[in-house]
Amino acid sequence: MVRFFRVDERLLHGQVAVTWVSQIAPTSILIANDEIMENEIAKMAIKMVKPNGINLAIRSISGAVELLKDKRTEKLQIFVIVKTVQDALRLVNQVDGITHINIGGIRKKEGSRLIGAAVYVNDDDMETIRQLTQKVGSVEFQMVPADRPKAAESLM
Amino acid sequence: MKTHIILASHGSLAEGMVTAVRMVIRDLSDNILALGLDQWETPQLIRAKVETLMKEHPQDQFIILCDIKGGSVANELMTLCIRSRVTLITGMNLAMVISLVLGSQNGADCGKERVAEILEEVAAGICCYDASDFRQSDQEGDGELW
């Protein structure tokens, strides 16, 4: 089952790996991203950050959907990480049982404005977050566990 | 049981280490103390500072991390190990300090067994990479969740 679902434009990186993994204590980490599938160096970087004793799988979004539908994942505690809220919505629309979305960092891009530490949203992001909130219910901005979470609804 | 983490080193390695730990653990408590020779001048003065702290907190646990085995700072502080609830570790690195801080937070007992586990994990994190590893990773595939 999906124990924790996070949006982070840096996917799995030092600070997140240590603090969130320590907090969540997952059995497995699933990185779901299309672009990374063609990028061996980026995959390598993620494999390097993987904490000991935790299984790591890197898949495209559709590969991740397939994996999450596999009965063997039922007994696992999976920490899913995607890069963008758009990818989050794609996944959430195809997989059941995701009850909370944590948003860590969203990259600055054209037309985006800063709404919190390391979180830049443009109109498309806002609309996507709105749909995520409708679909999942609980959507929060929280970079690291020590930060106070901020409900996405407060920005709508 | 409350644990004090003491970092002792040549130069300002200890103070520098704390700045690095703070980047990862934002709400770092005050139980971590950095004693580098740049600021503290001699191993004896560092030892005196640690002893004062131990006198002030006789029931607490102390984990002392030194930069290098056989160095004057480690040698001087080694004698404090004779006391109960004192552990001294040499070869401190960031992964080690982070794990020990997290492992001893909120009164958790970070005893010898847990320390040994942490040191094993930390040692596994000392790796060397070059181009040949990228080619190998290709063959390893994209991992499994189970």
Image (cartoon, coloured by chain):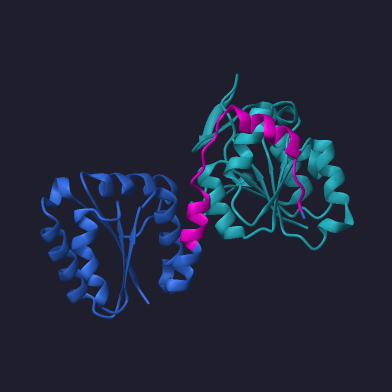
Chain colours: A cyan, B blue
Q: Main secondary structure of the magenta part?
A: helix
- Residues shaded magenta: B118-145
From the top left corner, tell me how far across and down residue A7 is, in percent: 65, 41
From the top left corner, tell me how far across and down residue B43 is, in percent: 15, 57
**B12, above or below A86, in the image:** below
Instruction: Pick whichever, A52 or A81, lies toward us.
Output: A52
Instruction: Pick whichever, A69 or B71, lies toward us.
Output: B71
Whether residue A143 is visible to the viewer of this picture, yes or no, is no
Name the residue: 24% across, 66% down: B78
The quadrant where residue A31 appears = top right
From the top left corner, tell me how far across and down residue B15 is, in percent: 26, 47
Name the residue: 13% across, 65% down: B48
Q: Quadrant of the C terminus of chain B?
A: bottom right
Q: Decide if residue A153 is on the left or right side of residue A16.
A: right
The quadrant where residue A132 appears = top right
Instruction: Pick whichever, B2 or B41, lies toward us.
Output: B41
Q: Decide if residue A16 is on the left or right side of residue A44.
A: left
Outermost residue on the front side: it is B70
Name the residue: 48% across, 69% down: B114
The quadrant where residue B101 appears = bottom left
